[in-house]
Image (cartoon, coloured by chain):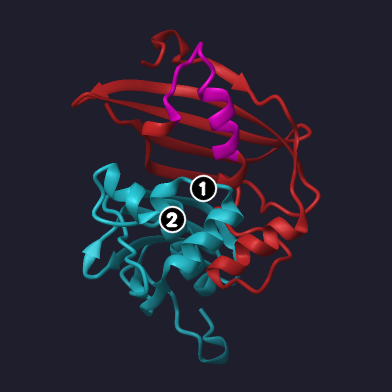
Chain colours: A red, B cyan
Amino acid sequence: MINPDSVGRTFKGVEEVTVTQSEIDAFAAVIGESDTSVAPPTFSIRISLSQYESILTQPEIGVDWTRLVHGDQKFEIFRPIVAGDVFTCSATIETLRVAAGNEIITVRSDLHNGSELVVTSWSTLVVRG
Amino acid sequence: MVNIGGARMIEVGMTLPEKVFFMDRALLKAYADASGDHNPIHQNEEFARSVGLPNVISHGMLTMALAGKYVTEWAGGSATVREFSARFIKPVIVPAGVKVDLTVVATVTEVDGDTFTLDITATSAGVKVLGMAKAVVVK
């Protein structure tokens, strides 16, 4: 069960994530994008999802990662990600509801390079009951 | 507006050309490696069936990434996207040894100067897989 007290709270990722050119190249190659001077628009999920996994599975929050389904996703991109960006990632649990035995949370992720907000994204994650 | 080089004016209601992507197990493996999402439902048929799925399914985010490629190809590259959202309403089922289609098309729903809003439709085997898929691009 997800701890209802976690709703509205922001959790900081513990580590900084440096984007490398080879990560952008690999992501772009999968979708057939040959210009790798900037990252494809959904690239930041690579950072957010792994940060979510380490943050949301902490016992004080209690997301069961093995039962997780991705419901929807939204990105707001203030500028494209480039190699050399060093991101801190936060996860804010905006909403939690229970429907048909499933726990449904909306999590916002803010990716900052220093003080610059580069991408905000929202993920609806469904923990199947 | 001046019509430069024969380019058509972009208007609300305009439908963009359809594009078909093909997805197979190798692509899912490549996406798993590139995204770091190694959930076995996207790789291992036995595991996928054990959790009640009909077969291996694509990452929703791979489907969305391909829809994103469709948008950026039209808009002029990866740097053009300001907003991008989608709901994962049905899985893309990817049996072994075949290539399944991901057919993407979009309609222009808003024009504000050089900013365009697109409603995107993505289907696989005739089934709509993304819901409420929308992108805002600066072209």
Q: Which residue occupies the foreground of this view, B124 or B84?
A: B124
Badge 1 amino acid: His
Residue B134 position in % (x across, y down): 39, 55
Residue lying farthest top? A5
Task: Please state which amino acid type lies under the numbered disc 2.
Answer: Gln
Q: Quadrant of residue B30?
A: bottom right
Q: Which residue is mark 1?
A: B38
At 40% from the left edge and 54% from the top edge, which residue is drawn? B44
Circle 1 packing at 10 Å, graded few (<14), some (14-19), many (20+), is some
Q: In what element is the residue under mark 1?
A: loop
Horizontal placement of A18 versus B94: left or right?
right
Q: Nearer the viewer, residue B91 or B130?
A: B91
Q: Earlier in the sequence, mark 1 or mark 2?
A: 1
What residue sits right under mark 2 in the picture?
B43
- The residue shown at (51%, 60%) is B29
Q: Give the class, few, some or many, for how many residues have Cα within 10 Å of label 2's Cα (few <14, many ≥20).
A: many
